[in-house]
Image (cartoon, helix red, strand yellow):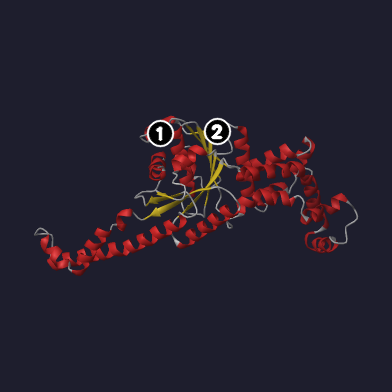
């Protein structure tokens, strides 16, 4: 592990925080890393640790040996750690965000009365809108995080955020939800339900909408959003509370990436966004990094000798290996391959050094020969970045 400004470690970071938000682009091992962090914290620190994923691929459930996950957390059996060749001082729990159920719970909590909540939940548009709301997934993930932390059940919560098209989507989701309830767009949508007199400003919108959608459909939309607006005070208050939690000292962010060009660029955008918004950037985890032995200068010199004079090295080998000319060619190509990988490894080292300016910890994870698909694999990954 490479230490940045504060000379900290993943172990120290997880001991000091109550919430860890992992973020990054898709396909970089973010879900696996989140699960590995939680598994290591449960094994080494003890207490109750929850990993919450919003990844619909259910890879977390497979890796933890838990068959089905939903909003209700499931404990990973202690025997699973024993089977993985380890032991857990604490408890590891896992849950996967159920967006629809979470929206239903929010409606029940913030609606002014049961009748209004029932009318919203029974609305024909609700099911579609609750799944397609702009940034619905990002907001509901942060909302669920707030709920779980507020319950006080867990000592540490590790959140695997959804892959986003925009690095700021989930960071800004609570603020945008609060802004939505005071937006001109919502006022226009609810105008027919609030008054029979359509305002001069919104009249062009309804004229066009009537032609395209039909007046009944438009009336249904207006009725739904009017009901939805009755929850505005609760939603706004809650969204502001979620925003405060994301900025709190007990919350930290771990950016996960690889050193390939596109994911690395996305990671740099995440790092800049997290820093600019005043959140705590705890660590950057870099998956699939080339091994450090490729940076060995003496190994590079040896490879250079083999490239320049492979015949001499081939002559030193025992007889019977093969034709000396063929052996020399093999040695030369292996050495050239080593030197090419060494160049890539040097470039990766420079990239890691640049990232270490922004965070206390840059944790490289080497290539694994096999996919990580069980708890033993998660702990093996965790060991690589723990101290």
Quadrant of the rendering where the C terminus is positioned: top left
Front disc: 2 or 1: 2
Specify the label residue 81 is tagged with: 1
Q: Residue at x 49, y 40 (%)?
A: 14
Q: Nearer the viewer, residue 214 or 94?
A: 94
Q: Nearer the viewer, residue 317 or 80?
A: 317
Q: Residue at x 46, y 42 (%)?
A: 37
Residue 82, image quadrant: top left
Q: Residue at x 68, y 38 (%)?
A: 105
Q: Residue at x 61, y 45 (%)?
A: 247
**Is residue 83 visible to us here?**
yes
The answer to whether 21 is drawn above or below residue 82 in the figure is below
Is disc 2 in contact with disc 1, using a CB cutoff of under 8 Å? no
Residue 117: % across, % down: 76, 39
Q: Which residue is mark 2?
A: 154
Give me the C-alpha separation between circle 2 and circle 1: 19 Å
Residue 324: % across, % down: 12, 66
Mark 2: few/some/many CA within 10 Å (<14, 14-19, 20+): some
Specify the label residue 369 is tagged with: none
**Is residue 67 visible to us here?**
no
């Amino acid at each position: 592990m490479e230490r940045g400004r504060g000379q900290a470690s993943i172990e120290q970071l997880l001991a000091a925080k109550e919430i860890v938000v992992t973020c990054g682009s898709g396909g970089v091992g973010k879900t696996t890393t989140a699960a590995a962090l939680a598994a290591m914290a449960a094994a080494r620190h003890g207490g109750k640790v929850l990993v919450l994923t919003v990844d619909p691929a259910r890879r977390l459930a497979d890796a933890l040996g838990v068959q089905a996950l939903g909003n209700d957390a499931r404990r990973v059996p202690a025997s699973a750690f024993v089977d993985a060749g380890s032991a857990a001082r604490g408890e590891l729990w896992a849950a996967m965000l159920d967006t629809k159920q979470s929206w239903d719970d929010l409606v029940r909590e913030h609606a002014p009365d049961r009748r209004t909540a029932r009318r919203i939940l029974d609305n024909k548009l609700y099911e579609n809108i609750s799944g397609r709301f702009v940034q619905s997934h990002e907001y509901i993930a942060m909302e669920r995080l707030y709920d779980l932390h507020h319950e006080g059940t867990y000592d540490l919560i590790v959140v695997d955020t959804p892959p986003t098209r925009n690095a700021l989507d989930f960071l800004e989701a609570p603020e945008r939800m609060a802004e939505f309830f005071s937006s001109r767009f919502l006022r226009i949508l609810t105008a027919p339900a609030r008054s029979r007199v359509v305002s001069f400003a919104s009249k062009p919108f309804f004229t066009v909408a009537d032609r395209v959608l039909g007046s009944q459909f438009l009336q249904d939309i207006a009725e739904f959003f009017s009901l939805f607006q009755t929850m505005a005070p609760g939603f706004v208050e809650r969204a502001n509370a979620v925003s405060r939690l994301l900025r709190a000292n007990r919350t930290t962010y771990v950016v996960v990436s690889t050193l390939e060009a596109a994911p690395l660029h996305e990671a740099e955008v995440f790092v800049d966004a997290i820093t600019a918004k005043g959140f705590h950037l705890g660590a950057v985890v870099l998956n699939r990094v080339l091994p450090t032995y490729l940076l060995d200068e003496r190994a590079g010199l040896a490879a250079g000798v083999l490239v320049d004079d492979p015949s001499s090295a081939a002559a030193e080998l025992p007889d019977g290996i093969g034709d000396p000319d063929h052996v020399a060619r093999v040695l030369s190509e292996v050495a050239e391959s080593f030197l090419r990988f060494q160049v890539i490894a040097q470039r990766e080292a420079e990239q890691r050094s640049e990232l270490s300016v922004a965070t206390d910890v840059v944790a490289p994870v080497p290539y694994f020969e096999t996919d990580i698909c069980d708890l033993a694999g998660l702990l093996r990954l965790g060991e690589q970045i723990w101290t």
